[in-house]
Image (tube, grey):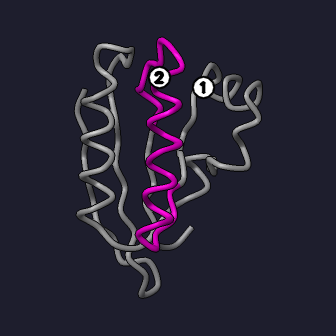
């Protein structure tokens, strides 16, 4: 599992993007938690977590994403999942987690002129 972290200035607001990759199951969920918490603690403003290349094998990763959203809120930040794959979207819908985890399409966000 790897990540890229970028800070952007979007109209005077801090924006951090994290891209997570890899397979997440009960054995690797601790790594996901550490990377997500590190990104939350190291930045300011809105945190966009791109999960397009994140393969969720079980529900353990959902708990980490929910915990990350709570941690971000406690830190005065917001966290949004970006480019959510269909299987994760189905899990979010089936578990009615949309009210806790914000979701955004990656192509809705761009910097500069259209």
Give the camera-side residue of 110 and 65: 65
Nearest to viewer (mark 1 / mark 2) = 2
Q: Which structural element holds mark 2?
A: helix
Specify start and end residues of the magenta stretch as a single range: 51-79
Query: Residue 28 magenta-drawn?
Result: no
Q: Quadrant of the C terminus?
A: bottom right
Percent position (x, y) of residue 23? 35, 16
Identify which residue is drawn at 26% across, 42% down.
35
How far apart are labels 1 and 2 at the CA level?
12 Å
In the displayed structure, would residue 70 be above or below residue 51? Answer: below
Asked if residue 77 lies in the magenta stretch, the reply is yes
- Residue carrying label 1: 88
Residue 52: percent from left, percent from top: 47, 31
Q: Is residue 27 above or below residue 31?
A: above
Q: Earlier in the sequence, mark 1 or mark 2?
A: 2
Q: Residue furthest bottom?
A: 12
Q: CB under 8 Å between callouts 1 and 2? A: no
Quarter in which the N terminus is drawn: top left
Residue at (44, 61) in percent of width and height: 72
Q: On residue 101, which mark appears?
A: none
Compared with residue 102, is residue 76 higher up or lower down, i.e. above or below? below
Q: Which residue is mark 2?
A: 60
Is 5 placed left or right of 114 in the picture? left
| Spot occupied by residue 90 in the image (x, y as percentages of width and height) | 71, 23
């Amino acid at each position: 599992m790897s990540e890229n972290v970028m800070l952007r200035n979007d109209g005077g607001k801090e924006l951090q993007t994290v891209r997570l990759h890899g397979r997440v199951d009960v054995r690797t969920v601790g790594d996901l938690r550490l990377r997500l918490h590190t990104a939350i603690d190291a930045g300011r403003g809105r945190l966009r977590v791109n999960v397009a290349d994140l393969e969720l094998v079980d529900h353990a990763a959902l708990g980490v994403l929910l915990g990350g959203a709570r941690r971000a809120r406690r830190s005065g930040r917001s966290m949004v999942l970006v480019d959510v794959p269909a299987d994760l979207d189905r899990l979010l819908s089936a578990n009615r987690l949309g009210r806790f985890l914000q979701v955004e399409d990656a192509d809705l966000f761009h910097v500069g002129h259209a």
